[in-house]
Amino acid sequence: MGLDIKIPIGLLFTIIGLLLCIYGFVTNGNAVLYEKSLNININLWSGALMLVFGVLMLIFSNWKKSE
């Protein structure tokens, strides 16, 4: 059994993505905060992408190779 870095990376991206999604939901109505990003809730979108990436990393870390 070798070193598998997918689990810590998956956990890191999942936790940070979840925190960013929560922050994006909480600050959703704040127009002044998102003026610089063309009124796009960048915290919500980047958090969602990080959350999906982290969950995929965790799923792939448990995927058995068929040998």
Image (cartoon, rainbow, N blue to C red):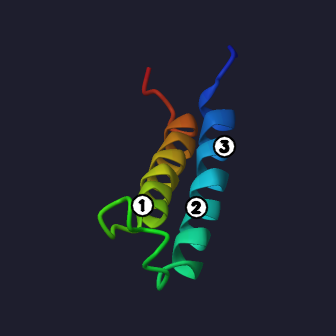
Instruction: Identify the residue position indicated by label 1 in the image.
Output: 42
**Separation (CA) of disc 3 from disc 2:** 12 Å
Q: Nearer the viewer, mark 3 or mark 2?
A: 2
Residue lying at the far left in this picture: please name it. Answer: 38
Choose the circle earlier in sequence order: 2 or 1. Answer: 2
Question: From what the image shows, is residue 56 above or below residue 30?
Answer: above
On-image quarter of the N terminus? top right
> Residue at the location (52% across, 40% down)?
57
Q: Nearer the viewer, mark 2 or mark 1?
A: 1
On-image quarter of the C terminus? top left
> Residue at the location (49% across, 50% down)?
50
Left or right, 21 with reference to 19 = left
Q: Nearer the viewer, mark 3 or mark 1?
A: 1
Measured from the top left, where is residue 56 in percent x and y? 47, 46
Instruction: Identify the residue position indicated by label 3 in the image.
Output: 12
User: Looking at the picture, which amino acid does disc 2 mark?
Assistant: Leu
Question: From what the image shows, is residue 53 above or below residue 23?
Answer: above
**Which secondary structure lies at badge 1?**
helix
Left or right, 9 with reference to 36 = right
> Residue at the location (63% across, 52% down)?
16
**Separation (CA) of disc 3 from disc 1:** 19 Å
**Which secondary structure lies at badge 3?**
helix
